[in-house]
Amino acid sequence: DTAVSQTPKYLVTQMGNDKSIKCEQNLGHDTMYWYKQDSKKFLKIMFSYNNKELIINETVPNRFSPKSPDKAHLNLHINSLELGDSAVYFCASSQDPAPGQGPWETQYFGPGTRLLVL
Amino acid sequence: KQEVTQIPAALSVPEGENLVLNCSFTDSAIYNLQWFRQDPGKGLTSLLLIQSSQREQTSGRLNASLDKSSGRSTLYIAASQPGDSATYLCAVRFLTGANSKLTFGKGITLSVRP
């Protein structure tokens, strides 16, 4: 009955490789997110999708490409991995209000994917 | 620039103490503020969500307050227990239009000693 799940949990790979992280939510939410938590534990949003449409892209290198096949899934593909990409990547979901409507509710986070680039 | 600050970065207290974790934010125009808990190697769990029209929220031994005008929130933990040891993150949803996002502080790592 996991709400937000991510695979894999751990990912160790060589610099220059291409890898994907998958995320699924069974909460019926219409908005999904990818966050990056760096070595100093600072959590920052990367992307947000609402009903499969990209709505937030926070100056992330174009080596990172999110893909949302349906509103329950948001996958993250990373090309040409670099050492600085090593971090924990969290997926989250929420049910966001329509523009001008409220309130905004909580986000539910997945367990994280620990990426180590060697 | 809209920022969220949590000081200190770490806190160690003996079991049983009542404690207050602080969060400050730079812009009083917010939708809401949330407190999350993160255990080592785990994801984030939402503890309390305070909408901009509210002053506080309570859940068990936790009480969160919000003062928008001063840009501050506090998370009060009563009768702390070793199981409360974790990192506590404050996140603010600023009023930036339809596509607003959560802005996180860097967290306070709490250690409750038996």
Image (cartoon, coloured by chain):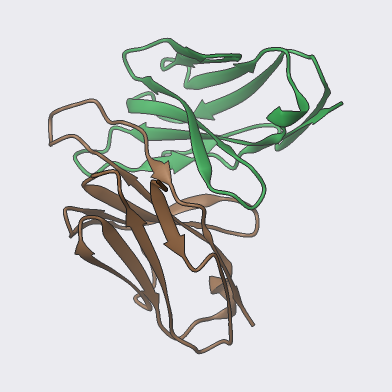
Residue A54, percent from left and from top: 21, 59
**Which residue is at a point 20% across and 56% down the rendered structure image?**
A71
Q: Nearer the viewer, residue A98 or A113?
A: A113
Whether residue B112 is visible:
yes
Extreme residue toward the top, this view: B55
Q: Colour of chain A?
A: brown
Whether residue A58 is visible:
no
**Left or right: where B85 falls relative to A103:** right
**Left or right: where A67 falls relative to B17:** left
Note whether B101 is above or below B49 in the view shown. Answer: below
| Number of marks in the rendered image | 0
Q: Which corner quadrant holds the C terminus of chain A?
A: bottom right
- The image quarter containing residue B57 is top left
**Which residue is at a point 56% across and 14% down the rendered structure image?**
B60
**The chain coloured green in the image:** B
Note whether B99 is above or below A14 in the view shown. Answer: above
Residue B48, percent from left and from top: 47, 24
Extreme residue toward the front, this view: A1
**Left or right: where A96 falls relative to B26:** left
- The image quarter containing residue A20 is bottom left
Q: Nearer the viewer, residue B70 or B16?
A: B16
**Which residue is at a point 38% across and 23% down the rendered structure image?**
B28
Residue B79, percent from left and from top: 73, 13
Residue A27, percent from left and from top: 29, 43
Note whether B106 is above or below A81 in the view shown. Answer: above
- The image quarter containing residue B52 is top left
